[in-house]
Amino acid sequence: MSTKAVTTTKNELAKAGEASPSERFTMAVIKEFPNGLNGQPTELTSFQRKLIQNYFIKLDGVLKEAESKRMAKSEQYRDALAFSWNNVNMNKLALDVVAYSSIGLDPLQKNHIHPIPYKNSKTNQYDITLMEGFNGLELKARKYGFDVPDDVIFELKFSTDVFKSHKKNAQNKVESYDFEITDDFNRGELEGGFYYMIYNDNPEKNKLVVMNRSQIEKRRPEYASAEFWGGEKDEWKNSKKTGNKVKVEGWEEEMFMKTLKRHCWDHVNIDSQKIDDHLMRVLENEQQGNDREVVEQIQAEANKKQIDFNEEDLDVDFEEVKTEQPIPEGFEEVAEEPGF
């Protein structure tokens, strides 16, 4: 794709009232880009403009789907605030789109980034949270990470598989493992998984991370959908819960693999020398999400029992955004497709 710079002019912004929703969205985002040198108009490459358009296309679809689900509910249970562009906090969204698009995250690429709308009761608008998928986390890690591995092997471990780790010690200079699939078509029960980080020029830095079923399942988001993870869910009829539960098979293998990949790329340290303003906003957004999680845990556990934090607790990945109201039906799970 051509990287020929496209300059935003004042005349272009003046036409905002005549523009389509897509064009108005692009102009709102362009306003938030840093000014060029000597106060010159902001210059965007054609690739940046394409990414901005992709954010609009994805967000427009998300809002329309959410509005369709809202209208499908009976008026008694329907929130009065419509999922429309007029009700979106555009200032926050524009700043976030600038940051994430500058990193190179494309919402139309598989598992790069997922927009999730939630109602902010203080502003009576919808804030759009942009949640990174595991491919987005890898892209960010490779662009901004410190000591990024050259390659990573991800595997799931079933009960009939034979696995043995070889940890680094005084006699063994390179951490490694043995893994054999004894029955390709009947591997048994899913027990967990592992990933192996490879450094081609420095194999002594190779690292093996093993996660059993319990360690993976505890990273399942609180609002995770049964359609993804499997299990039971509430039965609905005529937009109302029947009080019954229905069992859903889900995509457990894919969710375990997703968790392994998120754990890997989310734990690559950021190189402080590579941090720019765009990454700083992304990191601030992530921290705000984590802070909300901690606050809600404290509030939920207050006056009930002592909260004990250990080293393992501090390693938890908070994949879901906790909101001031439940995530709209259909957005319980960050919308990563189960297939890879």
Image: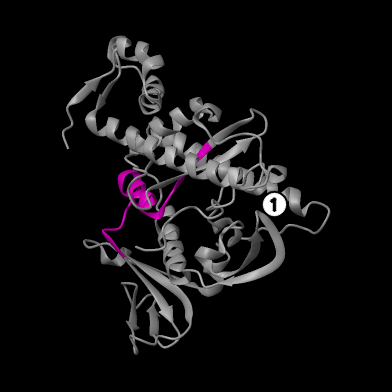
Residue 107 in view (yes/no) = yes
* 294 to the left or right of 201: right
Between 154 and 310, the one nearer to me in the picture: 154
Between 273 and 155, the one nearer to me in the picture: 155
Which residue shows up at 34% across the image and 89% down it? 182
Q: Secondary structure at mark 1?
A: helix
Kindly identify which residue carries mark 1: 297
* Count of numbered marks: 1
Query: Quarter-wise, where is residue 247 in the image?
Result: bottom right
Which residue shows up at 39% across the image and 30% down it? 98
Amino acid under disc 1? Gln
Which residue shows up at 45% across the image and 59% down it? 263
* 171 to the left or right of 76: left
* 126 to the left or right of 50: right
Q: Position of residue 104 (x, y in %)?
A: 31, 40
Q: Is residue 147 magenta?
A: yes
The quadrant in which the C terminus is found is bottom left
* 33 to the left or right of 247: left
Residue 102 in view (yes/no) = no
Q: Position of residue 158 (x, y in %)?
A: 43, 82
Q: Is residue 6 above or below residue 254?
A: above
Query: Quarter-wise, where is residue 11 in the image?
Result: top left
Q: Is residue 98 above or below residue 202?
A: above
Q: Position of residue 192 (x, y in %)?
A: 47, 75
Q: Which residues are magenta?
A: 128-152
